[in-house]
Image (cartoon, grey):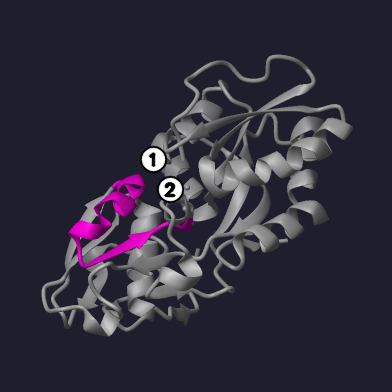
C-alpha cells in the first residue's frame, strides 16, 4: 500500500516495561537513561561505546508507556530519558507541575495511520471505527494527520492540543476510540483505522514507509528529545550523551537501520 506523504503543521510522542524502579546513577561514571525499546534503546546502544571512550557507563532502562519515564526522572530515580517530543513533555510538565527540560533533539518518527481492513483512507466506510492515542499531545497529532489527509476538518490545525471538540467537519462520521498509545497496534485487527506512534508501529513489526495509509512528511516538527531535570542538564555526563546521540555514528545507524521510518533531526 502506498502511503500518502503528508506535511504537518505543528509538534510530540513515546515506552516501558522493563526494569523496575531503582535509583538514579549508581556512581559518578554512570548515567541512567529511561527509554522506549524501539528505536530509542537501539539508538542508545550505538551511543554506548562513544560514551565509554569518555569514561561514562550507560545504564539503559526500557519502558513501554509514556508516563513512567518522566516520573522516574522527575523523582530522581533515573537521570535522564529519551522517548518523547516537546509537545508531549510540555503537556506532562503542565499536568504534573514538573519542570523537566529538553537537552537536544535526536530524531523524528513520522506518525502514521494504519489499517488491516482497507487499502486507502478513501475506502474508509461511513461510521468507521478509528482508534487514536488518549494522551493530549498524541491525540491532537492524530487528528491533525487526519485533517491534513482531508478526512476530517479541524477549526485550527496548528493547535498542538486539538481535541475531538475542535472537529468542524467529519464527512464519513468517523467514530473515535481513544486508547493508550501502546494498545493501538494490538487492536489494529479490531478497528477500521488506527493512528500509531512509529516506535510502537516498529515494535509491532509494521513498516511505516510501506504500511501506513498516511504518514507525516520528513518536515515533521515532532522531534524526539533527550530530556533531563534543570539541576542535571549541565552535568558533563548528560552533555556527553547529548553529543553521542548527535554523532555521525548515530546518524548513519538511523539512516541505515530504519530506512526512512525514523529520521535524524540533527
Q: Is residue 170 above or below residue 87?
A: below
Q: Is residue 183 magenta?
A: yes
Q: Is residue 147 magenta?
A: no
Which label number is shown at residue 57?
A: none
The x and y percentages for residue 45 are 69, 40
Residue 235 makes an appearance in the image: no
Q: Is residue 81 left or right of residue 245?
A: left
Span of residues in magenta: 180-198
Between 157 and 50, the residue placed more toward the observer is: 50
Q: How many numbered tags mark residues here? A: 2
The x and y percentages for residue 25 are 67, 19
> Which quadrant: the N terminus?
bottom left
Q: Quadrant of residue 40?
A: top right
Q: Quadrant of residue 149?
A: bottom left
Q: Is residue 76 left or right of residue 202?
A: right
Q: CA distance from mark 2 to mark 1?
A: 6 Å
Q: Secondary structure at mark 1?
A: helix
Label 2 belongs to which residue?
Answer: 91
Q: Is residue 164 above or below residue 169?
A: above
> Which quadrant: the C terminus?
bottom right
**x 45%, y 64%: residue:** 111
The x and y percentages for residue 252 are 75, 59
Q: Is residue 8 above or below residue 187?
A: below
Q: Is residue 98 left or right of residue 30?
A: left
The answer to whether the residue labelled 2 contacts the one labelled 1, judged by CB atoms less than 8 Å apart, is yes
Q: For the residue carrying disc 2, how many other residues have a C-alpha within 10 Å: few (<14), some (14-19), or many (20+)?
A: some
Between 57 and 187, the residue placed more toward the observer is: 187
Q: Is residue 253 left or right of residue 1?
A: right
Which label number is shown at residue 95?
A: 1
Q: Secondary structure at mark 2?
A: helix
**x 60%, y 41%: residue:** 41
Amino acid at each position: 500500500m502506498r502511503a500518502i506523504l503528508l506535511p504537518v503543521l505543528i509538534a510530540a510522542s513515546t515506552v516501558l516495561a522493563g526494569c523496575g524502579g531503582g535509583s538514579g546513577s549508581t556512581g559518578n561514571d554512570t548515567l541512567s537513561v529511561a527509554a522506549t525499546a524501539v528505536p530509542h534503546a537501539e539508538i542508545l546502544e550505538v551511543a554506548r561505546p562513544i560514551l565509554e571512550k569518555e569514561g561514562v557507563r550507560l545504564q539503559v532502562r526500557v519502558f513501554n508507556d509514556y508516563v513512567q519515564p518522566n516520573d522516574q526522572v522527575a523523582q530522581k530515580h533515573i537521570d535522564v530519558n529519551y522517548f518523547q517530543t516537546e509537545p508531549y513533555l510540555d503537556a506532562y510538565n503542565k499536568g504534573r507541575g514538573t519542570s523537566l527540560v529538553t537537552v537536544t533533539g535526536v530524531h523524528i518518527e513520522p506518525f502514521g495511520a494504519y489499517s488491516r481492513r482497507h487499502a486507502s483512507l478513501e475506502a474508509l466506510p461511513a461510521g468507521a471505527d478509528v482508534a487514536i492515542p488518549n494522551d493530549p499531545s498524541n491525540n491532537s497529532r492524530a487528528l491533525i494527520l487526519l485533517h491534513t489527509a482531508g478526512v476530517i476538518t479541524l477549526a485550527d490545525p496548528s493547535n498542538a492540543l486539538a481535541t475531538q471538540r475542535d472537529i468542524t467537519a467529519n464527512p464519513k462520521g468517523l467514530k473515535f476510540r481513544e486508547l493508550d498509545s501502546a494498545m493501538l497496534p494490538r487492536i489494529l485487527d479490531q478497528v477500521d483505522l488506527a493512528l500509531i506512534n512509529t516506535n510502537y508501529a516498529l515494535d509491532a513489526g509494521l513498516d511505516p514507509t510501506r504500511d501506513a495509509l498516511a504518514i507525516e512528511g520528513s518536515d515533521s516538527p515532532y522531534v524526539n528529545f533527550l530530556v533531563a531535570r534543570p539541576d542535571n542538564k549541565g552535568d558533563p555526563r548528560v552533555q556527553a550523551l547529548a553529543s553521542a546521540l548527535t554523532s555521525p555514528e548515530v546518524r548513519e545507524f538511523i539512516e541505515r537501520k530504519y530506512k526512512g521510518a525514523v529520521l535524524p533531526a540533527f
